[in-house]
Image (spheres, rainbow, N blue to C red):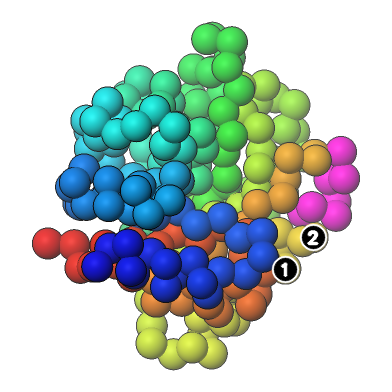
Amino acid sequence: MIAENLHKVISTLREGVTLVAVSKFHSVGEMMEAYRAGQRVFGENRPQELSAKVPQMPSDVVWHFIGHLQTNKLGKVLPYVAMVESVDSLHLLEAVSAWCEGRGKVMDILLELHLGAEETKGGFSAEEIREVLGRSARYPGVRFCGLMGMATNTPDEAVVRADFRRIAELFTALRDAHPALDSFRELSIGMSGDYRIAMEEGSTIVRVGTAIFGERL
Ligand SMILES: *Cc1c(COP(=O)(O)O)cnc(C)c1O
């Protein structure tokens, strides 16, 4: 079933879009079904769950962290992941950069945009993101790879599309404003319920859990 679901999702992906299989709350056994069907990029949102799963999965898995990350949990996440998609505050950005710089590493990150409409607390405003990118050299332990965002949680497709369009327009404007930041090319928008709309609006990364693994229990 998982392999079948995965193939169905893959068949709908646009050219060049990276699929992150969001495996939070799902077992290593279920993840291995997706792995054996060819999936290599997995997303987790809790440090404890991530660090427990890493040694149980094959070493060629590429991990993305997609949840809220407290700065006292960096050691449970940063050694294992290829990308932190959910850098949602200046405090976290500074901490990730310092942690990596101290270890001679550079972490790929996305800045999480907070759209005014949603209930969640975390995330940067568009203005804060402009400011951060204007002084990106101050964060030598991170590579700014783009933006992550979520649409308003609503069945109204027009609202979802408008949210994604706003995020995509900001992304394009930032990319054009910082041509020297050539790592800045990823736009992570879209989950199970809305990733097709997100791809139409320009996403390069989609984070899909339920449509692959089923409901989280
Ligand atoms: C859980 C989660 C997803 C996946 O959601 P689905 O609706 O199951 O596809 C995507 N992004 C983030 C940040 C998540 O926490």
State whether residue 15 is above or below residue 133: below
State whether residue 58 is above or below residue 194: above
Residue at image point 75% right, 33% down: 135
Image position, residue 127 (x, y; %) = 67, 54
> Could you tell me which quadrant the C terminus lies in?
bottom left
Judge by depth and name the residue closer to the eye, 130 or 146: 146
The amino acid beneath tag 2 is Ala
Image quadrant in which you'd find residue 5? bottom left
Residue 178 drawn in magenta: yes
Image quadrant in which you'd find residue 80? top left
Image position, residue 53 (x, y; %) = 25, 34
Cα separation, mark 1 vs mark 2, equals 6 Å
Q: Which mark is residue 173?
A: 2
Image position, residue 50 (x, y; %) = 29, 36
Residue at image point 85% right, 55% down: 176
Which residues are drawn in magenta?
174-180
Query: Label 1, on which residue?
Result: 169
Residue at image point 29% right, 34% down: 57
- Horizontal side of 7 relative to 209 (left or right) equals right
Residue 34 drawn in magenta: no
Mark 2 residue CB less than 8 A from any atom of ligand 1: no
Residue at image point 48% right, 24% down: 95
The amino acid beneath tag 1 is Glu
SS for callout 1: helix
SS for callout 2: helix
> Could you tell me which quadrant the N terminus lies in?
bottom left
State whether residue 133 is above or below residue 11: above
Image position, residue 24 (x, y; %) = 26, 50
Judge by depth and name the residue closer to the eye, 116 or 193: 193
- Check whether the beta carbons of the residues at disc 1 and disc 2 lie within 8 A of each other: yes
- Horizontal side of 175 relative to 147 (left or right) equals right
- Looking at this view, name the residue that lies furthest to the left: 217
